[in-house]
Image (spheres, helix red, strand yellow):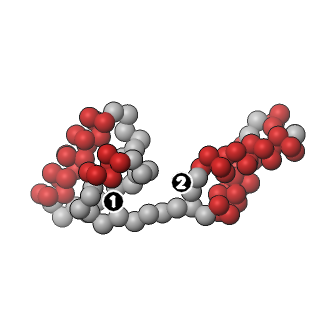
Amino acid sequence: MDECDERNSREQLIDKLYEVQASTDLRLLFTSRFISEIMERFQPSPRLEVIAKKEDVICFVTGQISRLPKCIQRDEELKHAVGKKIVEAVDGM
């Protein structure tokens, strides 16, 4: 839900999906980062927090290093610094 461009569009989408769910046997799963206005909207619904372990993020980032520009891949210190910053920026997301 946090990928919707505008708050109004997100609200309209949620409203419409709830309408469809109420009139059918549809089951929905919404995913989002922890944004208070989104969390409030789903307050009565069950919630499951999924947080990546730092080790898992490191493993994923290490596997993606080959996708970085060659100028970064050739410089071990820079490659390590970029990987470290990405892991820090992800913060369990």
Residue drawn where x is 28% and y is 52% of the image = 40
Say whether residue 73 is visible: no
Q: Earlier in the sequence, mark 2 or mark 1?
A: 1
Graded by Cα atoms within 10 Å as few (under 14), some (14 to 19) or many (20 or more), the crowding at tag 1 reads few
The x, y position of residue 16, in whole percent, is 19, 46
- x and y, in percent, of residue 63 in the image: 72, 54
Residue 59 appears in which quarter of the rendering?
bottom right
Closer to the camera in the image, 53 or 29: 53
Please give the label number shown on residue 93.
2
Locate residue 74, reporting x and y percent: 87, 40
Tell me the residue at 73%/49% (across/down): 84
Q: Which residue occupies the foreground of this view, 39 or 83?
A: 39
Q: What residue is at 70 percent from the left and 45 percent from the top?
A: 85
Left or right of residue 3: residue 51: right
- Residue 29 is labelled as 1
Q: Nearer the viewer, mark 2 or mark 1?
A: 2
Image-quadrant location for residue 23: bottom left
Say left or right for 21 vs 87. left
